[in-house]
Image (cartoon, rainbow, N blue to C red):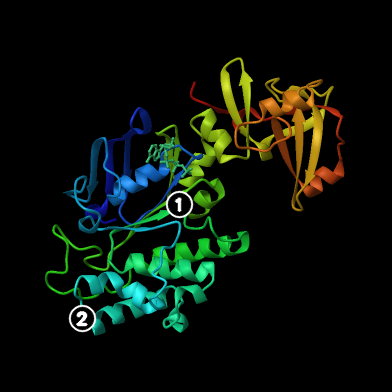
Amino acid sequence: MNARTDLELIALSKHYGDAVAVDRIDLKITGGSYCCLLGPSGCGKTSTLRMIAGHERPTDGNILLGPREITDLTPAQRGTAMMFQSYALFPHLTVLQNVAFSAQMKGVAKAEREARAAQLLDLVAMTPYAQRLPAALSGGQQQRVALARALMTQPQVLLLDEPLSALDPFLRIRMRAELQRWHRELGSLPPGRPKAGDTPSGGRAQPDGGPITFVHVTHSQEEAMALADLVVVMNHGRIEQAGPAREVFEAPRTEFVARFIGAHNVFDTPAGKVAVRSDRCQLQPLDATGSPDGSGLPVQVRAIEYQGAQVQVHVQRPGAGPAAAADDAPEGEDRVAPWVVCLPDARFFQAPVQPGDSLRLCWAPGDAHALAA
Ligand SMILES: Nc1ncnc2c1ncn2[C@@H]1O[C@H](COP(=O)(O)OP(=O)(O)OP(=O)(O)O)[C@@H](O)[C@H]1O
């Protein structure tokens, strides 16, 4: 990786009056990687992104891009570009003119800026729409144009604020694959030939057609896991955990991460709280001995959800009423009971269970992952 383009946040904070939106976060994002900032509403993701972009002034801390301190630079000087949630295209300009606009403002010659804009429209598969106005495009098409426009400044870091949230679920999944492909292909694009005087002080983005870093804000764990090399889980302005998607899923550090990333159950044990993946939990007859180490607890089936390839069995402590179950459900999750056992459909239908059945929920000791207190 190109050490020149690592993005580093050092003790970065943002306060709005008395409210602490971002609380002394430290984060290093390797140049060329795909990073997702993930967390519930209000956890400080957008504030962090806006500070990197230069749209929000940090209360404290520093931002480095490669060897450059960019904390106090203007957005245009940083080597970053932001793609906004509302694609904010100019309605009276064609697609090509929208993409070429920033270069036009900098005085880049028409032929040169349109050649670069055409190259980016090709990347996002929008060449046939170059002469259309934004109003004649679908949401997904507008998003592609917005992306091409952000890339026109040849940023070292592309900042994406909930880029898929306005799309329908099918398009969202398609665009996920597209984002991955664009991220991969951008590093191999020729850098273009900006005119002398066209470059911001301190260096030009993608100076050698090198890797581009994507920083993508989302509240969807599924999106983050599908896209990111580096998943950064935030809560109350702090980073709860940062690591590769698989590491965060396999070894959530805290109860918050285990619950937010989903597909985990959290249990109180004499040794402290542990997380166990829902697909590693098992249901046995109540009189079974449980796990080899004797772990496991009596539960009652509360609901069953058939999901095709798998079946989710929602369970709770025996006798706990619906209200108790709802209280136990983690914030932001719509579970009907505190724990979920996720079974392959074939296994479930070999020995189906019913709501009201009393069973033992257990797990292998090696599948229990200790959580930080
Ligand atoms: N301009 C502002 N003035 C005052 N408080 C703000 C401002 N912008 C954000 N906040 C507060 O800072 C906290 C973090 O907000 P931020 O937008 O960074 O969170 P987020 O994780 O991006 O949330 P969402 O997913 O809802 O966009 C929230 O409590 C929010 O209300």
Above/below status of 356 relative to 318:
below
Instruction: Mark yes or no: residue 312 visible.
Output: yes
Left or right: residue 252 compared with residue 337: left
Q: Mark 1 points at which residue?
A: 228
Please tell me which residue is depicted at 57% across the width and 22% down the height of the picture: 273
Q: Position of residue 274 (x, y in %)?
A: 58, 26
Residue pictured at 23% horizontal, 67% vertical = 208
Nearer to the camera, 368 or 63: 63
Q: Which amino acid does label 1 sit on?
A: Ala
Pointer 1 local density, CA inside 10 Å: few below 14, some 14–19, many at least 20: many
Q: Position of residue 291 (x, y in %)?
A: 71, 25
Q: Mark 2 points at which residue?
A: 109
Front position in the image: 336 or 263: 336
Q: Which residue: 21% across, 53% down?
A: 74
What is the quadrant of the N terminus in the image?
bottom left
Q: How far from the left and from the top, in percent, is residue 160?
A: 41, 55
Task: Point out residue 16 in the picture as x, y percentages from the top left corner.
Answer: 34, 34
Residue 326 found in image quarter = top right
Numbered circles on residues, count: 2
